[in-house]
Amino acid sequence: MSNTSSQLTFDVALARPEFSIDVAHELALDGITALYGQNGSGKSTLLRIIAGLEPTARGHIRFNGEVWQAGDPKTMMPAHKRGIGFVFQNPRLFAHLSVAGNLAFAEKRAAVVAPGMEPPITRDAVIDALDLDGLLERSADALSGGERQRVALGRALLSNPRLMFMDEPLSAIDNRRRHEILNYIARLPALFGIPTVYVTHALDEVVRLADHMLVLSGGKLAASGPVEDILGRLDLGPATGRFEAGVLLRARVKSHDTAYQLTALEHRGDAGVAHTLWVPAVDAAIGTEVRLRIRARDVTLATVEPVGLSTRNVLAGTIVEVNAELDTAYAETLVDIGGAPVRARLTRKAVDELGLAPGKSVFALIKSISLDRIVPLD
Amino acid sequence: MGPITLTLLLAGTTTIALLIVGTPLAWWLAFTKSRAKPVIEAITALPLVLPPTVLGFYLLILMSPTAPLGGFWLNLTGTTLTFSFIGLVVASMLYSLPFMVQPLQAAFEGIGKAPLEAAAMLRASPLDAFITVAIPAAARGYLTAIVLTFAHTIGEFGVVLMVGGNIPGRTKVISIAIYEHVERINYAEAHMLSGGLLAFSFVVLLFVYTVNRRYPVRVG
């Protein structure tokens, strides 16, 4: 991650007949910050307002002490003077130019900003980082979805932005290519040191890329903070999406079982208690830090230690919180496993029949763990 | 100057002048949210439905030396606007306005705001984005607009007759010359010019429809 932290402050509002947004926040941008929300939560609109692409938005925006807007829409600094690299949902490449022409478009205008100085981000570095070498002579029309988005990323970087905005850049890309592009995006902050705001409605992308996140719901800011903290909060259910809800844990690779193709991961909770979780073999050296996500829907609770069960990951803990969703069949439960939080999504009937309440000792049966990020050893 | 050269000169001048006037108008129509938009669109489309004589009649009144516009021109240049080449250019511009504006407006609407926003995010000013992104993207719209405007100006008759009369070398364009030949029962001459115009118009339209079916001219 880069060491240069940027400050983005905004207090903005936009009212439309069918939709309104009103968000204020002060953001220390470092690496990738996720702007997360369900469809229609206003996350893309917020990004566009900050970029200066919504001419009727009102409010105050400041970036590193520079005023981008001071109330009335008339006070807006024109979008092209803000120095933001914007990667849109649809890549928006210029169809009348080749890939090289698209890159040159950005490069030419970046050079004008600081005449006589070599811009810090060079064409060669970008082509190398995004593997664009083989595409340069192609027409923008003749690329696949993933290739287009890579070119769009490179073009945005070559404008030598002070800030990168990405608005659901993977939503138009098929699942197989998504991972490939995610890998490229994840590397960019370390390579070029440009703080990035990444808009998405997919939690796996948040977990893969971001350390900090904002949650937007109904045009308002529902939460902000470190990704681990936000995902552990039960009260954000509607904003974070019930189906994807879960907790995020950091663990280290402890050992490999080559015979069964399994890897043991060790997680140390706040209380210092170590737990071992078994996952299908991970291609990473022992000691490597990994980030894993346990979805609430993949966790079952038992009041006695289960025997004769195929689930291998069973952890003892204590219930901290039970949050019954009265208009549904479900209750979200937070269990403390020696300082590590685990969420379980149960039916309200099960909660009542087993007498599950805060303070009760339980065993958490974890059916599935997803590994979202492998942090390479330094 | 013979009728053919004069016609080509008139059509060329009109097309260039309309490119300059029509581009900002079409741009405004494509992106404005103003309530005046349908009014301006209707006015722009008027020449498509009005008899050329109606347009010519009002232009004649407007350009006459006693009217404000005509008087102003007379004071400025010492010549009258009616029965002059400049007068013909002004009349032709109004008459051919929809043929320039409508294909351009459709092209700009087809491009939309998205590529311009992308350009702005790459540090391009609005004018820079217009020249380097919007115009190349609207190239086919421009081709249609230019060809149709040029061809339509060549074919006009009523407006020219009303505003310009029939002065050889100044306002006597092909269509007027044909009219004169027919009146004098000079059918051989009339055939040559008419046949030429027919062939030219067909080739132009064939070219437009072959190259580009995307931005047709619509009435209203």
Image (tube, grey):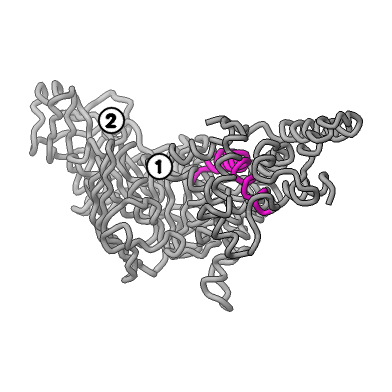
Say above or below: A226 vs A324: below
Q: Is residue B104 left or right of residue B83?
A: left
For the C terminus of chain A, the image quarter is bottom left
**Could you say which disc has been placed on residue A297 in the image?**
2
Q: Is residue A299 left or right of residue A256?
A: left
At 20% from the left and 30% from the top, the residue drawn is A301
Q: Position of residue B120 (x, y in %)?
A: 49, 57
The outermost residue toward the right is: B188
Q: Which residue is mark 1?
A: B36
Assess whether residue B2 is covered by the magenta stretch. no
Answer with the quarter of the image where residue A61 lies.
Answer: bottom left
For the N terminus of chain A, the image quarter is bottom left
Element assignment for label 1: loop
Q: Chain of mark 1?
A: B
Circle 2: residue type? Arg
Circle 1: residue type? Ala
At 29% from the left and 25% from the top, the residue drawn is A309
The answer to whether residue A293 of the structure is visible from this angle is yes
Q: Position of residue A360 (x, y in %)?
A: 9, 35
Q: Which SS type dominates the magenta stretch?
A: helix
**Magenta extent:** B86-113
Foreground of the two, A371 or A61: A61
